[in-house]
Amino acid sequence: MSATLASLVFAVCIITLFRLDSDRKARVSLALWLPVIWISLGASRMVSQWLQSGPMLESPDQYVDGSPLDRLILTGLLVGALSVLVARRDRVGALFRANGPLVIFFLYCAVSVLWSDFPFVAFKRWTKAFGNVAMVLVMLTELDPIAAVKRVLTRVGFLLIPLSVLFIKYYPDLGRGYNVWTWKQYYVGVASTKNGLGAICLVFGLSALWRFLVLLRSKPRPLGPLVAHGVVLVMSLWLFGKANSATSLACFFVGGALIAFTGRRVTHATLAAVHAMTAGIVTLGLLAVFFDPDGHLLQAMGRDATLTGRTELWNHVLRMADNAWLGTGFESFWLGDRAKAIWEIYWWHPNEAHNGYLEIYLTLGWFGVALLVVVMASGYRNVTAALRQVPEVGNLRLAYFTVAVLYNLTEAAFKVMHPVWVLFVFAIIAIPTVVRVEGPEGACETGPLAAGHGTLLGMPAAGPTSVTSLTPTGR
């Protein structure tokens, strides 16, 4: 099949996927295209890369300049999201009040710009990180948050997964790469690296699996959506084989197991088992990465003892950390003389520590690490609260939370527009319950309720007043 014909076939395939999964009853707004575009760009490539107008990164100094085109597009998306959130300011205010630890963490990130060697660059990167929060808030302030989350994940997955298959098979100049030293071929799909392709498969493969299992348990089973998400799931598994990203594949199996295990009614026994499974999985990952000096556990998992050179890099950058308490400033470690010194040592020119927690330490210091721990602890409480009250989406949040914790052991995903970071924010955020009073002219929101007074989304309480929430605050 020629590339042109294959493009037509895949275009028809993507359109068919959207038609099979169409839900005209879903109450969602056009504003959801903002997070769809934002997440798609963060998961794949920036516009300048797609147009091949961005410079080839031959020096760390080029990271400082960036692309004016990308900056213009991302600024436009962020301004659009902020405009939407201003119109929904009552709901946004309730969300901010319910998520104090997350707000404090991002405020500290903003303050850390002040001691960066490159404050303007650090501030630009902080706006991207804040953009992740803004896009999540656009989804969660919709009248039907669950439908909004489904719509965004579906749109991005239906685009990036099939296009990755198309690029790998029929557009090798776009979908494949070569090691500059060994000329060994690797696959990237719509991403720019093989780990980026693995992250796409992880995030949107899990969402496809989640939707597939929910639809499989439905009575009657909707055949169209079931086929659509099944096809995307099969494509994701095929891409995993091409990406050769062990971290993403391991995280996918962990997240998939959690989704399958918690897909039905969650009892106290189930919740206790979830706590035990999550603690066991995280402990195993920590032991394998940090407390297995001989690498026996890693080798048993099919990885080499150095994690493909990661442990050597970790030791090197730790020796370069200047300020243990405050770090170098938000996203500022891999700039200037430090990056030049590292690039002279490593031929593969790293621009991240390949460990999210180490990355936070380098840029935000121990204060940043401590705040992240608080965010994760409060986030896990919100996740388990959602799992009890709204298992339909709570199990997806649990999966995204757990895989983010594991993924960042060997990859740095707590960074700007990384899809794992965006979905981690979605997973941990607390959603205050909102009263919806049914009157002769329709529903009217009257504000957040106290914690614990919520009911399941779509299941109104008795009487004229019902409560709508994606999850209680967990407080």
Image (cartoon, rainbow, N blue to C red):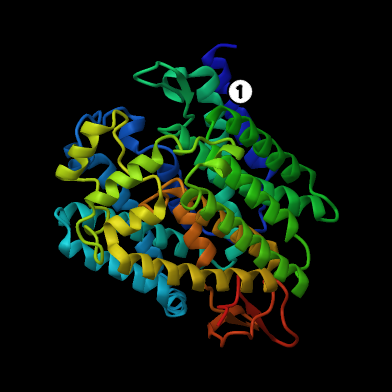
User: Which quadrant of the figure has residue 392?
Assistant: bottom right
Q: Count how many numbered circles sit on residues in the image.
A: 1
Q: How far across and how far down the image is residue 22, in percent?
A: 66, 47
Give the residue type at disc 1: Val
- Residue 235 versus residue 29: which sits nearer the camera? 235
- Depicted 365 relative to depicted 104: above or below: above
Is there any visible trace of residue 91 in the rendered image? yes
Q: How far across and how far down the image is residue 322, in percent?
A: 19, 57
- Image quadrant in which the N terminus is located: top right
- Residue 112 versus residue 47: which sits nearer the camera? 112
Is 86 on the left or on the right of 474, as rendered? left
Q: Residues within 10 Å of mark 1 (few under 14, many from 20)?
A: few
Q: Secondary structure at mark 1?
A: helix
Find the residue positioned furthest to the right. 220
Q: How far across and how far down the image is residue 286, in percent?
A: 51, 55
The residue under the point 43% across, 23% down is 174
Q: How far across and how far down the image is residue 283, in percent?
A: 57, 58
Is 28 on the left or on the right of 81, as rendered? right
Find the residue positioned furthest to the front. 294
Is 34 on the left or on the right of 23, as rendered? left
The residue under the point 50% across, 71% down is 377
The residue wearing badge 1 is 9
- Image quadrant in which the C terminus is located: bottom right
User: Which quadrant of the figure has residue 26?
Assistant: bottom right
The residue under the point 41% across, 42% down is 41
- Residue 225 versus residue 413: which sits nearer the camera? 413
- Depicted 461 relative to depicted 356: above or below: below
The residue under the point 22% across, 29% down is 58
Find the residue positioned furthest to the top. 2
- Depicted 405 relative to depicted 370: above or below: above
